[in-house]
Amino acid sequence: MKSSIMKKLLRGLAALCLLSIAAGILAFVMSSGEAANRDLVSYWAAGEQLVNRANPYDEPAIFALEKQAGLVGDRPFIMRNTPSAFFLVAPLGWLTAKGAAIAWSLTLIVMLIASVHMIRVMAGGSTDRLHLLGYLFPPVLACLLAGQMGIVLLFSVALMLYLIDSKPYFAGLALVFCTVKPQLFLPFAVVLGLWALRRRRFLLGLVSAVAFSLVMGAILDPSGWSHYGAMMRGAGIADEFIPTLSLAFRLLIHRNAIWLQFVPCVLACLWAGWWYLRKRSWDWRTDGMLVLCISVAAAPYEWLTDEAVLLPAILFGLYRANNRALTIYAAIAGAALLLVLFGAPMTSGYYMWTCPAWLAWYWYVLSSSEPA
């Protein structure tokens, strides 16, 4: 009874906020000057460079493009995705900065709606409205406001889960979008590779996805990887504060030992492989989502917006959560939502707790509750 009341309250809150948030985001995107002062302008500028057969990581050229589009400030937004993301951003180069912002934001909204729908169907097509909470997941909202790629990753994972039983080749192919931020999926990829060894059609789709992103990157910029390496060496990423457990681990032991930032990920990869091999059965919608949460939490480089990819785990968890788990989630999500709505910078240490919190909450749901 109490669980039912809590679900109704959460659904009511989601329904009340959903339309106003969507309208606000679109108004924000289309307002004068905003297109050139959000993260998504880096995708447009990189696309513009690719269309003109130029270096998409060329800081002076990118800065000039973004200034012409209305950038305020003395530092450009530089796309830090690998050349495997070129196929995704190149079409934006045919549009103006504002046109690209609108097209990109609408694409993210469509991908989000499709992802939530697929997760709802996989959860049994429940007639309640608990899935509306997906639109209020703080990383999703932060991703929409910044125009970041987290929702693209979410769509990729949701589509893979949706197709994995009925159309394994296309399920593997659906992971093409995950190639744009491979550092988020390393432990997940270990399990995926082991699982795919006995499923040839899925493996073929996965190989096709990786090959497509690499070939398109080479076609769009044959020197893409050398350009990427030069950009990363000059970006000073080692000196940036990234609110992750991996950076905290490095800072606690030795600030200048960059390799320490990869230790949590390596340990997570070893654990993921061991855990998969010892399990007698495997369910991607429960076991796989736990590995995904651990992958993102242990990533050497991730932001709050990247955590949008965890929405399948969150929604699957909500559908099986008991009253206590729902209350805990409301507290976690509410605190994170306040940070997003009050504009806490992505580089703020205030976000260091969010990804571990989603992981801990999902682990608690799996260990303490039965499917709803």
Image (cartoon, rainbow, N blue to C red):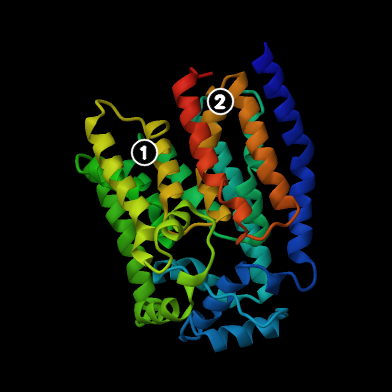
Q: Do residues under tags 1 and 2 come within 8 Å of each other at their CB atoms?
A: no
Residue 90 is left or right of residue 288, and the answer is: right
Task: Please provide percent x and percent y for residue 176.
Answer: 39, 56
**Secondary structure type for disc 2:** helix
| Residue 180: quadrant of the picture | bottom left
Amino acid type of disc 1?
Ile
Mark linked to residue 164: 1
Q: Nearer the viewer, residue 296 or 87?
A: 296
Residue 178 visible in the shown view: no
Q: Nearer the viewer, residue 53 or 150?
A: 150
Q: Residue at x 62, y 61 (%)?
A: 147
For the view shown, which residue lies furthest in the top direction?
A: 1
Q: Quadrant of the N terminus?
A: top right
Q: Residue at x 50, y 73 (%)?
A: 90
Name above or below for residue 244 compared with residue 219: above
Q: Quadrant of the C terminus?
A: top right
Amino acid type of disc 2?
Tyr
Q: Crowding near pointer 2: few (<14 within 10 Å), some, many (20+)?
A: many
Q: Crowding near pointer 1: few (<14 within 10 Å), some, many (20+)?
A: some
Q: Which residue is mark 2?
A: 319
Residue 198 is left or right of residue 69, and the answer is: left
Residue 173 visible in the shown view: yes
Q: Residue at x 59, y 47 (%)?
A: 112
Name above or below for residue 253 compared with residue 198: below
For the view shown, which residue lies furthest in the front direction?
A: 253
* Gap in angstroms between the C-alphas marked 1 and 2: 21 Å
| Residue 184: quadrant of the picture | bottom left
Task: Please provide percent x and percent y for residue 263.
Answer: 33, 54
Name above or below for residue 17 compared with residue 12: below
Mark with earlier residue (1, 2): 1
Task: Please provide percent x and percent y for residue 24.
Answer: 78, 54
